[in-house]
Image (cartoon, helix red, strand yellow):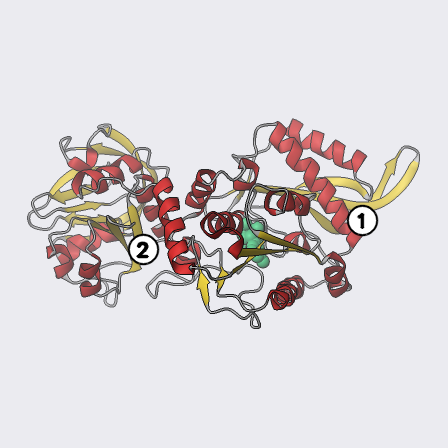
Amino acid sequence: MKKELVIVLDFGGQYNQLVARRVRECNVYCEIYSYKTDLEKIKAMNPKGIILTGGPNSCYEEGAPTYSKELFELGIPVLGLCYGAQLMMHVLGGKVEKADAREYGKTEVIVDKKESKIFEGVSEKTICWMSHFDYISKVAPGFEITSHTDNCPCASCENTEAGLYAIQFHPEVLHTQEGTKMLYNFVRGVCGCSGDWRMDSFVDEQIKAIREKVGDGKVLCALSGGVDSSVAAVLLSKAIGNQLTCVFVDHGLLRKNEGDEVEAVFGPEGPYELNFIRVNAQERYYNKLAGVVEPEAKRKIIGEEFIRVFEEEAKKIGAVDFLVQGTIYPDVVESGLGGESAVIKSHHNVGGLPDHVDFKEIIEPLRDLFKDEVRKAGLELGIPENLVFRQPFPGPGLGIRIIGEVTADKVRIVQDADAIYREEVAKAGLDRSIGQYFAALTNMRSVGVMGDERTYDYAIALRAVNTIDFMTAEAAEIPYEVLNKTMSRIINEVRGVNRVMYDLTSKPPGTIEFE
Ligand code: XMP
């Protein structure tokens, strides 16, 4: 595995993960490192190529993130993007200046050097995503300009002899219509990567590696039913069969029927060889949550209780050799690379690590994968599609989709409403195109009339957002008929609800969840 590696050096740009994802879409394995990474370490990794990301700084300012000239003299192809492009020029003797106006948004780029390897198969006029104040006013010696825009004399340049390429716009962003082609041209064409990063080989190699590592040891996995832990569990089950025990805690805050669905897949009736323990802890959670209204307090109780239940089960099993964590690559990146990028992750999955489970080592089989790759691995492993393409679901579950106190009755209301909403969205064929959607239970009761009776019931809020990274989001435009049908079914079928609203708020200022 990882025979061919491309390194992304992170200069603090918001798209650093996107760059790595796009490279992997070209079947080239790629990892992100801070720009502070030592040159010797980079050399030791023997990358086929290096990509410098964008960043919020001005490269000519004192203290701005930089890299020494030697990086460009390793004989390894380097591609600078936005800040990375400017930095390349700055370090190698070109000139970067502040422009009169910011160039921002979709912009037509005119390719001047059609035979440039980067632009192979790219249209002469192509829409690209620009976002910069500074611009390259003079390219470094040995470079030639390969494209421009109306406002920007150098949208890209290159020194093919030295293997150095600079692009002012963002090929990694989907708004750049032929961006993936350009990145493909760099990693496959310029760097000569063969594209040996494939999910089937990843799965096979992981199974082999897990077998070697685990030997005849015992492995314990906390299964949430979410995509990551499910894929991790199946991978382990394929590798070591019933040396694996999965503990699934049903905290009573899952979506409708979800507990049974997880059991159907992973339990004794399911297709996998493993030990499956389901803990029905609903009552225990509802008791702990009684009277608690503050969102963070609820999160904390749900997280801590999860750990306690898990520990109790683990104690019954006794000492194990390994504990499985469903960590994925964005978790690794977001928990900080030690560079310029902010530590973004504000929501850790419930709990963290248990203190009282007797294990020797942690296994994180998905540590190198992005979410879409985890899904691909899941499909490769034969996991049912409805599980693989499951909606993102917060660790604290419906606990943070019920405003105010959580009770069994409120859980029933939100579960039923949410199930109807999901059914209608799926019927309309929208289930794969919306980033995240769900029903939440507001704590508001209002007067209504049903038949001849006055009602005083709860309002359900429907939420649907489009988002790339879950850090920002916009309300999705769901067709009115779908909303209307959902409203009518919820009012008719869910006891305790007499009003349904659609939440139009974007993030910021709202968050995706209600609490
Ligand atoms: P917000 O509400 O912050 O949500 O806009 C962004 C994304 O994170 C998920 N989320 C959570 N996930 N534990 C989790 O594991 C949490 O406490 C939590 N809170 C929010 C949310 O579903 C959305 O995808």
Q: Residue at x 67, y 36 (%)?
A: 421
Q: Residue at x 74, y 62 (%)?
A: 284
**Nearer-the-camera pick, 1 or 52:** 1
Note whether 442 is above or below 177 in the view shown: below
Kindly identify which numbered label has been placed on residue 445: 1
Q: Position of residue 297 (x, y in %)?
A: 66, 66
Q: Residue at x 56, y 31 (%)?
A: 430
Within 8 Å of ligand 1, the CB of disc 1? Answer: no
**Nearer-the-camera pick, 348 or 12:** 348
Name the element at disc 2. strand
Q: Position of residue 208 (x, y in %)?
A: 37, 50
**Residue situated furthest front in the rendering:** 216
Going by the numbered disc 2, the residue's amino acid type is: Ile
Whether residue 364 sits left or right of residue 161 in the image: it is right
Whether residue 357 sits left or right of residue 201 in the image: it is right
Q: Residues within 10 Å of mark 2 (few under 14, many from 20)?
A: many
Q: Earlier in the sequence, mark 2 or mark 1?
A: 2
Note whether 511 is above or below 128 in the view shown: below
On the rendered image, what quadrant is the C terminus found in?
A: bottom right
Name the element at disc 1. strand
**Disc 2: which residue:** 32
